[in-house]
Image: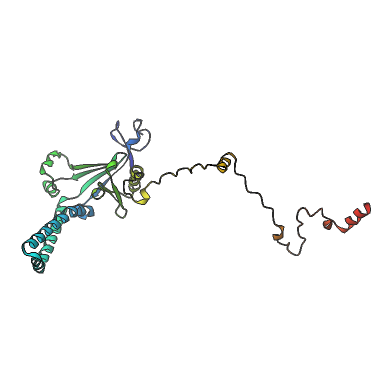
């Protein structure tokens, strides 16, 4: 399970509960959180390509539109047609392929990293670490090589903290799920991807629990339907009038019992005697002949 609690006295992660199982200190409700660590290779991660495309593709589109506008202002529509009939499309395709190759090379030089995810009552917290850092890896990540000064030179496996990102629940405007890849996508504002949280199969349900608990009742946040917490149904309005007063003061009487229909009784197997309906035993037709004669003689 990804749910753990942080004990300030022990300064370590412990099992969630009311008290710390190690020192017995009372744990607040805010101490419980979902925490897990993921290893990532940027070249094989779609979200790294997505982050690069969201910046480079709009910039390339702006450059192309400006070129076409300048050609149209200088030579009119004929100049634009000659531009497309020439080598401009092929040149544009070569530039796009070169740009994709450059992005791939940069992602390969970055090396693998470790990402620490924490989802708690305050929001989503992401911390990235770079194991075995080098100046080349930092340059490929557009980081200053001066960060190497923070690394302990005597450590056998040095780890450098690259960045921290905190996203409070109140700033989130939209949430999308990518269950095939165990991704939770948080947007702030609704049109900009702020944080992509990659979960493990064991931490997926715990992360969804926090999202449903903190954002499920907010109508201003765009959520998938199964993350939306349904509001409790309000009690029906009190009826007015004489009938309403009667229904509130007098309990509802059960429906009258329906008398059994003996005509639908099945006949006894083998032609046996049939049941006599109640109330007909005292009728003269139901009295045996011998008893009827005795009654007449007595009268």
Q: Where is residue 193 in the image (x, y as percent from the top left)?
A: 24, 49
Q: Where is residue 49 in the image (x, y as percent from the top left)?
A: 20, 54
Q: Which of 70 and 28 is in front in this view?
A: 70
The vertical placement of 182 against 120, above or below, is: below
Residue at 14%, 39% (x, y): give it.
Answer: 150
Q: Which of 287 and 48 is in front in this view?
A: 287
Q: Position of residue 24 (x, y in %)?
A: 36, 30
Residue at 6%, 64% (x, y): give it.
Answer: 75
Instruction: Tell me if 168 is positioned left or right of 145 in this view.
Output: right
Residue at 23%, 53% (x, y): give it.
Answer: 47
Instruction: Tell me if 17 is positioned left or right of 60 in this view.
Output: right
Looking at the rendered image, the quarter that the N terminus falls into is top left
Q: Which color scheme is applied?
A: rainbow
Residue extending furthest toward the front: 241
Residue extending furthest toward the bottom: 85
Instruction: Tell me if 218 is positioned left or right of 243 in this view.
Output: left
């Amino acid at each position: 399970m990804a749910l753990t609690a942080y004990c300030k006295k022990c300064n370590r992660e412990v099992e969630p509960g009311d008290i710390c199982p190690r020192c017995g200190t009372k744990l607040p409700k805010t101490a419980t959180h979902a925490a897990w660590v993921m290893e990532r290779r940027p070249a094989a991660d779609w979200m790294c390509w997505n982050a690069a495309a969201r910046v480079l593709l709009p910039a390339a589109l702006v450059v192309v539109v400006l070129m076409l506008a300048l050609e149209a202002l200088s030579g009119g529509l004929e100049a634009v047609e000659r531009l497309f009939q020439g080598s401009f499309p092929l040149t544009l395709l070569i530039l796009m392929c070169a740009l994709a190759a450059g992005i791939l090379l940069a992602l390969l030089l970055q090396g693998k990293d470790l990402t620490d995810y924490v989802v708690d009552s305050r929001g989503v917290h992401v911390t990235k670490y770079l194991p075995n850092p080098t100046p080349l890896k930092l340059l490929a990540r557009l980081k200053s090589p001066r960060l190497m000064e923070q690394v302990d030179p005597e450590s056998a496996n040095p780890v450098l903290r690259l960045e921290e990102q905190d996203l409070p629940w109140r700033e989130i405007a939209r949430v999308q799920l990518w269950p095939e890849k165990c991704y939770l996508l948080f947007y702030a504002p609704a049109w900009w991807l702020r944080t992509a949280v990659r979960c493990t199969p064991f931490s997926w349900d715990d992360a969804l629990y926090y999202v449903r608990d903190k954002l499920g009742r907010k109508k201003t946040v765009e959520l998938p339907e199964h993350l939306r917490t349904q509001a409790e149904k309000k009690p029906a309005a009190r009826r007015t009038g004489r009938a309403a007063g009667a229904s509130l003061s007098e309990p509802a009487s059960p429906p009258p019992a329906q008398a059994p229909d003996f005509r639908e009784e099945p006949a006894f197997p083998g032609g046996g005697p049939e049941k006599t309906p109640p109330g007909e035993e005292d009728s003269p037709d139901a009295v045996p002949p011998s008893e009827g004669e005795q009654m007449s003689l007595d009268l």
